[in-house]
Image: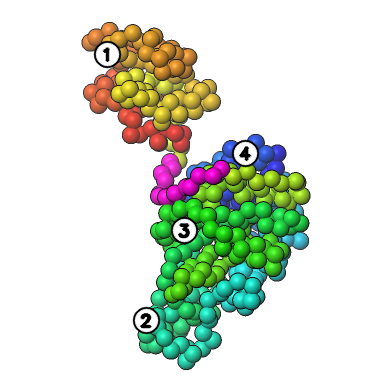
């Protein structure tokens, strides 16, 4: 069992690492980051606070957490953190899952990346001064930016003058109007590139591809192999490409880390974080990828902080566990969560037919600790005897009766997502 710290855990990168590793038997996950509201606080049992990497205290705080938890590996989950961890890796008593210090520093700068790789792959034309720009539009972005922060499409000299004054270390480059791609990669330090999988970025939000479609093109592999060989990449990494005015793919940036939407290739069999751990251990590696296209579309997901406790569940059958002729998967998922937590499950129903037969037909006959089959007109509240219980039923009148007579929390199917987080 490897103890793995995700830092900072609340970023989209950190959440993808969690999704990839939380069910792996080889890994025990831990979270750390600034003491600000973020999603990781609701995913992990405990969230460990660390000051901003721009403060004087962060390294000391990180080392204390690593020593206390006996952390084996640290995954950086934010671009500035990559450089900070890389620069201090000799002081931290855990393996930082990153390539060399040189690569971490190089890839943090777009201008240095272009200078290093312009003879290896196609990179965008960069204007050295404002006066060099004669044709518009052009693109301007921070040299050490992330996401879409500070990125602008400029249409005139006046707009360019204004934008340059607002951006620290701006890079002015040709405008690339075509389609945009991310290529997810994995490299072994000795064997070189072992995997690359391209995906088109169909819809972006704050620089993150929230809709992305896997696509296989030989030119992606050509780019990936040249970059991997030149920079001696190791572990998981990615790069972004965009088509220029003549539809030629051009390098935008390289990230020596997990990408937030790597899930599109992960669900085909490429668990990038787990492979990165094995690569760090110099284990023999094999890649097994399923061959089907994937469209990944991401949206906000609700998580809830625990606020109730219960030791038994009373749940209705028709229109609750069974929706028409289909099992309510969310309800059954919740019931199995109750089994894991040793919470008693009681089915309470007025089902008009042969209850044993229908439970057997849907393979539910061993799911419940107790089954209460009510007669017509018999109130469900009359059969609820547990004090520390909850009641789940699609019927408002049934929930109201139980609430008034038993004073316990009641839920309909739309509220199951809350119970799943308890």
Return the residue at label 2: 155
Please give the range of residues in magenta.
290-304
| Measured Cα–Cα span from mark 4 to mark 2 | 50 Å
Are circles 4 and 1 on residues that touch, CB within 8 Å? no
User: Is 300 inside the magenta-drawn segment?
Assistant: yes
Asked if residue 89 lies left or right of residue 402, the reply is right
Rendered residue at 71%/58% (across/down)? 192
Q: Earlier in the sequence, mark 3 or mark 4?
A: 4
Q: Is residue 349 visible?
A: yes
Classify mark 4: helix, strand or loop.
loop
Return the residue at label 3: 200
Q: Earlier in the sequence, mark 4 or mark 1?
A: 4
Asked if residue 97 lies left or right of residue 369, the reply is right
Classify mark 1: helix, strand or loop.
loop
| Measured Cα–Cα span from mark 1 to mark 2 | 71 Å
Q: Which residue is at the front of the view, 400 or 335?
A: 335
Return the residue at label 4: 24
Q: Which residue is at the front of the view, 318 or 39?
A: 318
Which label lies toward us, 4 or 1?
A: 4
Residue 282, position in %: x, y? 76, 49
| Measured Cα–Cα span from mark 2 to mark 3 | 26 Å
């Amino acid at each position: 069992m490897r103890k793995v710290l995700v830092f900072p855990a609340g970023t989209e990168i950190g959440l993808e690492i969690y999704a990839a590793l939380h069910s792996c038997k080889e890994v025990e996950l831990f979270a750390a980051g600034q003491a600000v509201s973020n999603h990781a606080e609701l995913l992990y049992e405990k969230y460990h606070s660390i000051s901003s990497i721009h403060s004087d205290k962060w390294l000391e705080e990180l080392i204390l957490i690593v020593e206390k938890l006996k952390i084996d590996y640290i995954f950086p989950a934010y671009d500035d953190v990559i450089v900070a961890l890389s620069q201090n890796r000799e002081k931290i008593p855990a393996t930082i899952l990153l390539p060399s210090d040189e690569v971490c520093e190089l890839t943090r700068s777009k201008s240095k990346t272009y200078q290093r790789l312009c003879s290896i792959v196609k990179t965008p034309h960069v204007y050295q001064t404002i006066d060099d720009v004669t044709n518009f539009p052009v693109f301007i972005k921070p040299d050490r930016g992330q996401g879409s922060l500070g990125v602008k499409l400029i249409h005139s000299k006046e707009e360019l003058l204004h934008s340059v004054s607002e951006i620290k270390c701006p890079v002015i480059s040709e405008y690339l109007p075509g389609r945009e791609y991310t290529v997810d990669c994995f490299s072994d330090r000795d064997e070189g590139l072992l995997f690359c999988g391209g995906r088109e970025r169909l819809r972006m939000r704050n620089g993150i591809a929230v809709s992305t479609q896997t696509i296989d093109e030989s030119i992606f592999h050509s780019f990936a192999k040249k970059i991997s060989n030149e920079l001696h990449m190791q572990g998981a990494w990615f790069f972004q490409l965009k088509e220029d005015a003549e539809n030629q793919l051009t390098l935008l940036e390289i990230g020596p880390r997990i990408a937030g939407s790597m899930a599109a290739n992960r669900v085909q069999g490429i668990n990038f974080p787990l492979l990165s751990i094995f690569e760090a251990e110099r284990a023999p590696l094999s890649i097994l990828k399923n061959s089907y296209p994937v469209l990944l579309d991401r949206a906000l997901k609700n998580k809830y902080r625990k606020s109730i406790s219960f030791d038994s569940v009373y749940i209705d059958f028709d229109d609750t566990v069974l929706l028409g002729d289909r099992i309510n998967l969310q309800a059954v998922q919740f019931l199995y969560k109750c089994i894991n937590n040793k919470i008693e499950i009681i089915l309470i129903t007025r089902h008009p037919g042969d209850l044993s037969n229908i439970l057997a037909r849907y393979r539910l006959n061993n799911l419940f600790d107790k089954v209460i089959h009510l007669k017509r007109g018999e109130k469900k509240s009359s059969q609820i005897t547990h004090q520390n219980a909850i009641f789940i039923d699609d019927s408002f009148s049934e929930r109201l009766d139980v609430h008034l007579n038993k004073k316990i929390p009641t839920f309909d199917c739309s509220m199951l997502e809350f119970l799943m987080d308890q």
